[in-house]
Amino acid sequence: MSQHAETPGEPASFEVIVICGPGGVGKGTVVAELLQRDNGLWLSRSWTTRDRRPGEAHDAYHFKTTDEFQAHIDRGGFLEWAPFLDYMQGSPLPDPPDGMDVVFEIDVQGAQQIKELFPDSLLIFLDAPSREIQQQRMVQRGDTPERIKQRLTKAEEELQRAQGMDFVHVINDDLAETVAEVLGIIDSHRQR
């Protein structure tokens, strides 16, 4: 079960944007493009106890040991955290620079917790056009067959969990079109 830290009762001075979806749908790629094209977005870099994937950027996550992660939990340093397959992931309490909005790239379970803490947050659920394409993307990034099977099972669980939540659903078929669509959704959210 996801856990979250207590946050002050005052409203956030920034927009909270959550990008989530199953593994292999392109969340990281889409988020990287969003950050390049909108200088008003700041990424809350998640902590994880998993190993870095081959070719994965050193700053994709804060890679921590289980003991370091647990110590941060004990200090109340996470907005939300949860076990994921055989490792832990969590979002630290956000502290964006003035005038910037926070982007979280997390799973559905974490999105649920963030929505409880920030009711006006924007939730965007990215998905692949098909499970076959999602599987191809995981193969291309070097996931093992066993890991792919686990992640595809987890994908179905995330889709079920996302039902009934306040997500804007976006299919990531073409990167440029997906990024343009998500930027439009973010702009509309900021103008409300």
Image (cartoon, helix red, strand yellow):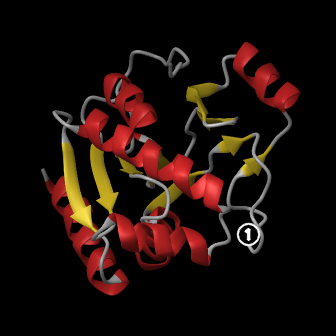
Can residue 160 be seen here? The reply is yes
Q: Nearer the viewer, residue 178 or 45?
A: 178
Please identify the residue farthest to the left as the structure is shown: 192
Question: Image check: 65 left or right of 39?
Answer: right
Could you tell me residue 19's position as x and y percent? 39, 53
Residue at 75% from the left image edge and 75% from the top image edge:
55
Could you tell me residue 179's position as x and y percent? 33, 76
Residue position marked by numbered label 1 in the rendering: 57
Query: At numbered mark 1, what does the secondary structure look like: helix, strand or loop?
Result: loop
Three-letter residue code for mark 1:
Ala
Residue at 30% from the left image edge and 33% from the top image edge:
161
Residue at 40% from the left image edge and 31% from the top image edge:
114
Residue at 55% from the left image edge and 18% from the top image edge:
5
Q: Is residue 10 above or below residue 143?
A: above
Can residue 98 be seen here? The reply is no
Q: Is residue 146 above or below residue 69?
A: below
Q: Quadrant of residue 111?
A: top left
